[in-house]
Amino acid sequence: MPRYMHAATARGFTLVELIVALAVFAILATLAVPAFTAYFERTRLRAAADAVASLIGDARIGAVKQGRAVTVRFGGGGTQWCVGAREAAMPPVGMPMAGRATCDCTAAVGACVVDARTAVVTSAMHRGVALVVPGDALEFDGASGTRVGAPGSGAQLASRTGQFALTLAVSPMGQVSMCSRGGAFAGVPAC
């Protein structure tokens, strides 16, 4: 058997094939990085907005469950923010219910408690998300779970680059809704 026939049946990659494959991989990876970055920004923002909406919903449920007013307060701003909820203190027997009990989520750890559970969402839990427009303090009635007082605004959260933004609004009935002010989010309508 001639020697040149053996070389034709040898298996493996040539150096040229390997370099072409690496070049194609590098080009595809370069094109994919911005898409992954945008995906992670949207995911972090959506997780933070869902956590804040869940905290507001839990505060409303806690108000009805405990039969006491619960206040939700936004603290800080920019990349250093927090949202906390606190129920009003239980009055002594025969006394009327106490009013608003605010918590400072930027200070003491145990200041924000609803139904014996800590009720705080912080920027440390959601890195890369900024609180662009902090909302007004919200108070939920202990009997009906509806929002009490002046019509409060919602809050607006934005991604690190500002390319994506979600707005949370609370209806007078205490329902939280979410809409997108920048970028497309699956299942979230535009504002």
Image (cartoon, helix red, strand yellow):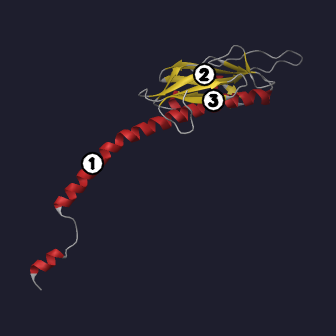
Amino acid at the residue labelled 2: Gly
Q: Which residue is mark 2?
A: 154
Query: In whole angstroms, how far apart are the C-alphas of marks 2 and 3?
Result: 9 Å
Left or right of 93 in this view: 112? left
SS for tag 2? loop
Q: Which residue is mark 1?
A: 26
Residue most extreme to the bottom: 1
Query: In whole angstroms, how far apart are the C-alphas of marks 1 and 2?
Result: 44 Å
Nearest the viewer among 94 and 42 is: 42
Pointers 2 and 3 in contact (CB under 8 A)? no
Q: Number of callouts in the render? A: 3
Image height check: is 29 above or below 110?
below
Along the polypeptide, which appears first: circle 2 or circle 3?
Answer: 2
Residue at image location 49% in from the left, 35% down from the top: 184
Q: Which residue is mark 3?
A: 177
Q: Can see residue 52? A: no
Left or right of 66 in this view: 181? left
Amino acid at the residue labelled 1: Ala
- Counting from the top left corner in percent of width and height, residue 104 is at 61, 18
Along the polypeptide, which appears first: circle 3 or circle 1?
Answer: 1
Other-residue count near label 1 (Cα within 10 Å), few / some / many at <14 / 14–19 / ≥20: few
Q: Can see residue 113? A: yes
Nearest the viewer among 43 and 89 is: 43
- Counting from the top left corner in percent of width and height, residue 29 is at 31, 46
SS for tag 1? helix
Quadrant occupied by the N terminus = bottom left
Residue 167, numbered label? none
Amino acid at the residue labelled 3: Ser
Residue most extreme to the front: 190
